[in-house]
Image (cartoon, rainbow, N blue to C red):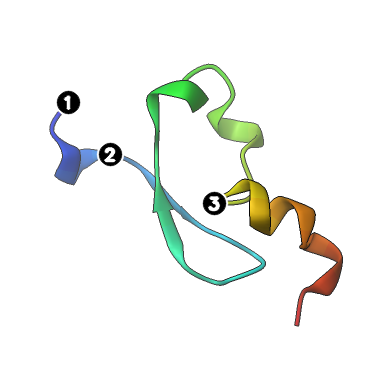
Amino acid sequence: MKKQHLPTKDCPVCNRPFTWRKKWEKNWENVKYCSEKCRRNKTQQA
C-alpha cells in the first residue's frame, strides 16, 4: 500500500491528522490519539 493511500484520523487532543502505522495494524479501530504525549494529556482537551 502506498503512503498516500493510508487511512487517517484526527487526534482529539491536538486536532492534527495522523496516519495509520504498522504497529497499529491490529488495533486501528481503537486508536484515538496521535502520540503518547496526547494520550497522557487527554484530560486537558480544549
Classify mark 3: residues with Cα within 10 Å, few (<14), some (14-19) or many (20+).
many
Indicate whether 13 appears above or below 2.
below
Please name the residue shown 47% across and 68% down the image. Answer: 16
Query: Which part of the image, by quadrant, shows the N terminus?
Result: top left
Indicate whether 21 appears above or below 18.
above
Can you give x and y, in whole percent of width and height, for residue 34 in the image? 54, 51
Per the image, the residue denoted by label 3 is 34
Q: Earlier in the sequence, mark 3 or mark 2?
A: 2
Marks 2 and 1 close (CB-CB < 8 Å): yes
Residue type, numbered disc 2: Leu
**8 or 16: which is nearer to us?**
16
Residue type, numbered disc 1: Met
Indicate whether 26 appears above or below 10.
above
The answer for how far apart the CA atoms under marks 2 and 1 are is 7 Å
Please name the residue shown 77% across and 74% down the image. Answer: 45
Per the image, the residue denoted by label 2 is 6
Quadrant of the rendered image containing residue 41: bottom right
Per the image, the residue denoted by label 1 is 1
From the viewer's perspective, is the residue at label 3 or at label 2 nearer?
Answer: 3
Residue 1 located left or right of residue 27: left
Please name the residue shown 40% across and 32% down the image. Answer: 21
**30 or 38: which is nearer to us?**
38
Residue 19 located left or right of residue 4: right
From the viewer's perspective, is the residue at label 3 or at label 1 nearer?
Answer: 3
Can you give x and y, in whole percent of width and height, for residue 19 in the image? 37, 46
Residue type, numbered disc 3: Cys
Q: Is mark 1 on a helix, strand or loop?
A: loop
The answer for how far apart the CA atoms under marks 3 and 1 are is 21 Å
Can you give x and y, in whole percent of width and height, for residue 36 in the image? 65, 46
Q: Is mark 3 on a helix, strand or loop?
A: loop
Q: Which of marks 2 and 1 is nearer the N terminus?
A: 1
Q: What element carries label 2?
A: loop
